[in-house]
Image: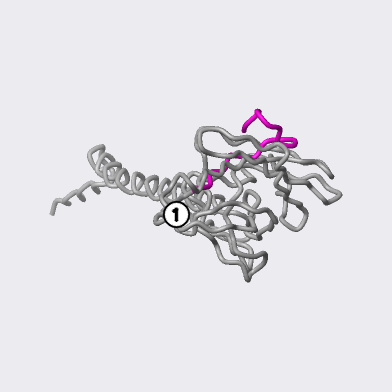
Amino acid sequence: MPTTPLATPPSAGPASAWARTRRALPLAVTAVAAAGLLAACASTNAHQTGTGPAGGAATPGSTTQAPGATRPASPAGTGSPSSGTAGLAVCQSASLRATVNASQAGGAAGSTYYPVDFTNTSSSPCGMYGYPGVSFVTADGSAGRQIGAAAQENPGFGRMAIRLTAGGVAHAWLQVAQAGNYPPSTCQPVTAHWLRVFAPGETVAIYVNHDFAACSSASAPLLTVMPVRAGQGVQGTTP
């Protein structure tokens, strides 16, 4: 009886080798794709970890304010003093003396312009940047109540970074419109004996004793303030 030869296994032929290659290709592509996905995830995680400040995640729009802050929220456009002083410590209210230098005051177009001088009474330099906050009040300290509207910022002059050495002086011009510009029924005239001043970026007030003809009605705004500049205010050199 003749012997029937055994069939050649499929693995021995060229066609079978090609079939194995076709089966291996999807597995290789899948492995490469998985490796690429893992690398991308690792890169994304590393990038996200480095975006926040050390010690915690960044919180967009978050701000902090000193305890016991009494200054109202700054109007839109008011900059932080640290943005213009290149890391120099901001001048604190406790280390500043504010005065109204009436000897350098000047009048024009129904207003009087007073320089409000800030003196650095500390032994270290500090920085100022932007506009002070100013308003009339009935008394110094927490017992004082605001009279009329707080000072508006004059947008015609840019902010400048000011460096105050120990004993150094900076100033901001305060425009005080005449209360007589308004009818008495609108102005509700009074005499203000105190000025409440917030240095730029500060929330603790400095009080200055000076008499002003004021309007007790907030609908008759009298005060406009300019940004701080170096040195004492000198008549005719506003801001």
Q: Residue furthest bottom?
A: 143
Residue at the spot 73% in from the left edge and 39% down from the top edge: 103
Q: Main secondary structure of the magenta part?
A: loop
* Residue 235: % across, % down: 68, 32
Say which amino acid is labelled 1.
Cys
**Magenta stretch in the rendered image:** 222-239
Residue at the spot 63% in from the left edge and 54% down from the top edge: 198
Is the residue 7 above or below the residue 14 in the image? below
* Residue 127: % across, % down: 72, 43
Total numbered labels: 1
142 relative position to 7: left or right? right
Residue at the spot 55% in from the left edge and 32% down from the top edge: 108
* Residue 67: % across, % down: 63, 68
Look at the image and tell me whether residue 59 can be seen. Answer: no
Q: Is residue 31 magenta?
A: no
Is the residue 215 above or below the residue 67 in the image? above
Check the picture and name the quadrant holding the C terminus: top right
Check the picture and name the quadrant holding the N terminus: bottom left
Which quarter of the figure has residue 56?
bottom right
155 relative position to 130: left or right? left
Q: Nearer the viewer, residue 63 or 144?
A: 144
Q: Which residue is mark 1?
A: 187
* Residue 134: % across, % down: 59, 52
